[in-house]
Amino acid sequence: MTKPTMLLTAILAELVIIHAIRSVDTIYPDTDAIPIHTLMLVLPPDTSVSATDVTRAALTQLWWITTDLASQTANVRLLDLLFAQRHWRPLVYTAARGLRPAVEQCSLDVVQWWYAKRAERQMWFADVKREWIVDLVGSSSVDRAGVLRMFKWYCEQVVSAAGRNVVHDEALLANAIVCGCKQRDRALLEYLDSVCGSAMELPANQNWTWSAVNAAAANQDLESVEWILSRIGSTGAQACNKRLIQELTRGVFASGSLEMVHWLQTTTLVFPVTGGTRLAGEIDLNDAVNGASIGGHLHLIRWAIQEQNLVKLDPATGKIPRYLTVIVDLDQVVKEMNPGFVAVLEWWTTAGNAARFGIQVTGTMASWTVRQPLLQGNVAFAEWWLVQSSVFHEYTNVEMVADAAVGGNVQMLDLLYHKAGSAFRYHFNEPEIVNLMTEHGQIKALEWWKANVKSPSLMSCFHPMSLAKAGHNGHVDVLDWWKKQYDRLGQPLPLMPPEVLQHPSTMGQLDVLDWWKANVPDAVAQIDRLWQDMSPRVTKWWFKHGKAVRTAGADKSWILHAALHGNPIMLAFAFDANGIGPGIPRDAVHVDLVVRTACAHGHANVLEWLAQHSGLPFTFGTAAVFVAAVAPLLDASWNVIEWWAGRVKEGDKRCMVDMKELERKFQLIPKGVEVWPQLLKYLE
């Protein structure tokens, strides 16, 4: 009896894929083509990465499955499959949309795949950027073991390759230490120790050192606190130790842990390098109270003041001694929004405890300070704010109503409309409020308005442009809701501006476009031009459903748009839509402009496609080399120059330039003399 196998035979798998491809409407690839993608990945190993007609056809059909997409989904096998088919289907990749997501997801195997292809001169892109690694190290949403692997790789492969060490890259080192303390990532701090060794002295006069010790203390991470303090170097005056103690104290009280407070009370801290010390029991009341307030820990504020553990109150007045100055910054309390922060605000202000104990509270409460808790729908904070708004005038009433509308917080809207008085109710007369609800798809808030606000009426506030922004955000449900309101009145929707279709088109919101076609077909039929910022699948949607678009033909600006965004598949589609191919005069498609656009933005993959697959009269002349070499001055990369140099070394006559003329061009621009030697290195 033959043992069954879990693998499809190559012939059967190919037949299934052919049938699946023929059954898929590629306008909706995200759902309809998932089975094809799955089938491609279960092909027998000996054929899954080979250049068979079927896999080639599948990848040609599945134009949205790009190198970037495979990188985003951490699928190295799919990357191999795409790479094997690159001669029939050009690779579509950009560092921003493919490499960066791989870094953000800690997909080290994907990042290494990219670098391996670059080493083979099959792909061209700039190095992983330091800020990507900094963002990753500070992220709380990824696996810390993965973060450490990616950080190690970056230090060893990118930083070291540039002839540097992480200890000499203060920005990277600082962020790694601060984030390591915030995330309680001991493994990261230990790695820094192993790499930097005795060379790592933390400066006592830098904000980031203070932030690190504060974060470690707030996280109740004594080990990291001691790690930092033992490495304080001689950089900065000894007086800076005072600031370190201040941040340490604030962090300890922000932790909310009485155990941490007792540790601080009983520990003498010594700074080995500077010789500074802090004796046990020396706790500054101002730092303690501010730290506890920021942390939202009312019990520690009471412990310090009411229970007189850090201060002896004047028996006659019940206030702190006059020689002490304690100023609590309420702005910082609101900015941090730690659990319990509203109770702290109320204790200091509404309950009158600041005046009772002789403590000053300050805070401008500017709009950007108070806006965040209101946007998050914190009704308790809103109630506190309504009492305090007579003191703090920065945040206007209309902004408060608008933020409640954007957040769709019905409880907040109800509070402002029914309980906050006429000063707030007046702002519900603004049509902008209804339109904000519409733009953000807040149907419950619209229903609340309809039930509570009688004047002005809901319908009189409506503006068609709000549907454009709702479409931008993909809120099909709010489009349905407004149509039903007009249906109940027996009226059609008002005349719609083209923006209601432009916004969803540029954002790839096919569901929204489908809604307009089904409900207001005339709006779709009248569009006779397309917009540049559209994906290939949206473009295909318009050619299928837009009658006037089909008649007018494709906009030539698509070609430049494809070059601008490094998408040779879209470039091929734009050429095909315009009837461009071999034998077409180069002036008809502005090939030189396409080349220069790709050069300026570092898209070597577009140039490779033009050179190998377009069939157009491609040349890479002096002007193109000049643009590509100047681009790094504008924060682009050298990858196009690397691509060009490789072509020159291979003897590609289309890429030969007059070097004397090119050198003359560089002598005419600032920093051109610096760039020229760097360019020549690529030709060595």
Image (cartoon, rainbow, N blue to C red):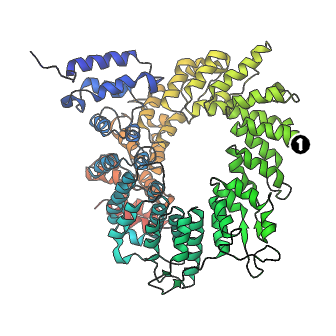
* In the image, farthest residue toward the left: 1
Q: Position of 3 compared to 336: left or right?
A: left
- Residue ID at (58%, 71%): 249
Q: Nearer the viewer, residue 158 or 200?
A: 200
Q: Nearer the viewer, residue 669 or 353?
A: 353
Which residue type carries mark 1?
A: Gly
- Counting from the top left corner in percent of width and height, residue 137 is at 45, 57
- Residue ID at (71%, 61%): 331
Q: Position of 56 compared to 349: left or right?
A: left
Which quadrant is the N terminus positioned in? top left
Local packing at callout 1 (Cα closer than 10 Å; few below 14, some 14-19, many 20+) is few
Q: Position of 674 compared to 543: left or right?
A: left
Image quadrant in which you'd find residue 155 = bottom left
- Counting from the top left corner in percent of width and height, residue 327 is at 73, 71
Q: Position of 25 compared to 283: left or right?
A: left
Q: Which residue is mark 1?
A: 421
- Secondary structure under tag 1 reads loop
- Counting from the top left corner in percent of width and height, residue 366 is at 75, 57
Reply above or below: 123 against 451: below
Q: Is residue 569 visible?
A: yes
Q: Nearer the viewer, residue 616 or 338?
A: 338
Q: Is residue 164 visible?
A: no
- Counting from the top left corner in percent of width and height, residue 683 is at 30, 59
Q: Nearer the viewer, residue 111 or 63?
A: 111
* In the image, farthest residue toward the top: 490
* In the image, farthest residue toward the right: 422
* In the image, farthest residue toward the bottom: 275
